[in-house]
Image (tube, coloured by chain):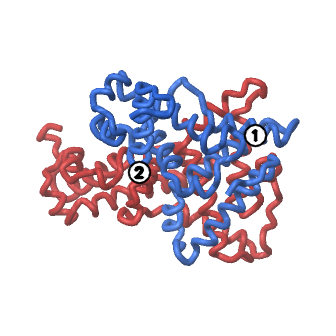
Amino acid sequence: MVDASGDREISSRDALLDAAIRLISDRPPSAVTGRELAEEAGVNYGLVHYYFESSGDLVKEARLRHGSRLVEETMVGGTRTIPVEQTISDREIFGFAANMALEGAYDDDDVTRPVFDAMLRMVVDADPGGDPVHHRATVATIVLLQLGWPVFVEHNVQGLGLDSNADGELIREKFFVVLQSLYRSVGLEVDW
Amino acid sequence: MTDAHRPRGAVEVREALVAAAARLLGDSAPGQISGRRLAEEAGVNYGLIHHYFGGKEAVLREGFSRLSESYAAEEALDTAVRVSPFSLLRRPDFVRAIAYASLSGEIDRTHVVHPTLDTTVDWILGARADDDETKVRVDVGMATVFHLARCLFASTVDPWVERDGEVQDMAAQVEERFVLILRALSLGLDPGTAARGEREPFRRSSVPG
């Protein structure tokens, strides 16, 4: 596998990380085997151990790549927020984050949170001189809702005796109205 | 588990299996829990699952109910001296079980009951008697999404919130905003206003409740 720059080493490594992101979007990191990873990436199994010392190392690198891809690609270098429709439908966003969180993959000393940081920069630009507590609480709440809604909405619909079909439109509409209110409170418009 | 301590008799065996299911559900998707694993965790013979429950599905459903009921019982005790409305932070096992079952698309199969949702709806319906009941349920659902997400992603969000060195007590202040936002979502008020730190008055309906 060779990328545009022709650098075979870097691209096989990134192919493995991208494969890890896809697989972890569907199941927890511990349920992903090295063989599956190599097959998904289309690279030789031996390369998994060549590039990554341990599964912990691989998971950590996948997390870093996931964050930087979201900022660079989805947020276009931190110039737009994460589109709401995409957070609802794209398991590579919410599924990955949830499966990682379930296995404690964020519980370490590394507090790098590229998506949170990029959003906070946008908020500060849109609302200069605003209250830093308001800014931070709003960014955190928006990210929590955009990640949590697709994970938990079905549980709540059932637990509350609502009907996905009959009430689905009302539920989605509420979600949009809530996000719009939060985004507007810091001077941003929602990117649907 | 030595043979001397193996659960015996219907009551002990059923209890051991349900307790085992409740533990295992916090660590994997329901579909990933085999009958053998369940029996091993409970320290009972595999055949007893079928004998007492007819199959592992029923054990898992009861395991889920166990998680949910024990949380509801704690909630009831807690309401008098409530410290944080994010009460599920104390029950990561229940949050994880919901998340695993949701992510694997098995929420239907496990039939999750969440008794505290009903209690919350009843309480808010009393206060918002002039509102449409479906609308109230949708609002409570939105607030619950926030509650569950706040708990599932605590280790993702909290270190970032605490990192700001310029504002004193940033973490505590953000937590207060989270509480205001949760209140606003539950009552159908404006979350952006709550994020600004304003506690919007809630106009209780004329019906006492």
Answer above or below: position of B144 versus B206.
above
Q: Secondary structure at mark 2?
A: helix
Q: Cα distance, mark 2 to mark 1?
A: 33 Å
Q: Residue at x 11, y 41 (%)?
A: B3
**Within the image, what quadrant is residue A111 found in?**
top right
Q: Residue at x 45, y 50 (%)?
A: B94
In the image, taking residue B159 as reference, residue B179 lies left or right, namely: right
Q: Residues within 10 Å of mark 1 (few under 14, many from 20)?
A: many
Asked whether residue B160 is in view, the answer is yes
Q: Position of residue A36 (x, y in %)?
A: 30, 40
Answer above or below: position of B82 versus B60.
above
Q: Position of residue A10 (x, y in %)?
A: 45, 26
Residue A122 badge: 1
In the image, taking residue B90 as reference, residue B163 lies left or right, namely: right
Q: Secondary structure at mark 1?
A: helix
The subunit carrying tag 2 is: B
Q: Residue at x 53, y 47 (%)?
A: A93
Q: Position of residue B96 (x, y in %)?
A: 44, 47
**Within the image, what quadrant is residue B111 found in?**
bottom left
The subunit carrying tag 1 is: A
Indicate the colour of chain A: blue
Indicate the colour of chain B: red
From the viewer's side, name the closer residue of B132 and B3: B132
In the image, taking residue B150 as reference, residue B7 lies left or right, namely: left
Q: Residue at x 31, y 25 (%)?
A: A49
**Within the image, what quadrant is residue B2 found in?**
top left
Q: Position of residue A134 (x, y in %)?
A: 78, 42
Going by the numbered disc 1, the residue's amino acid type is: Met
Quadrant of the snapshot with the C terminus of chain A: bottom right
> Where does label 2 land, which residue?
B100
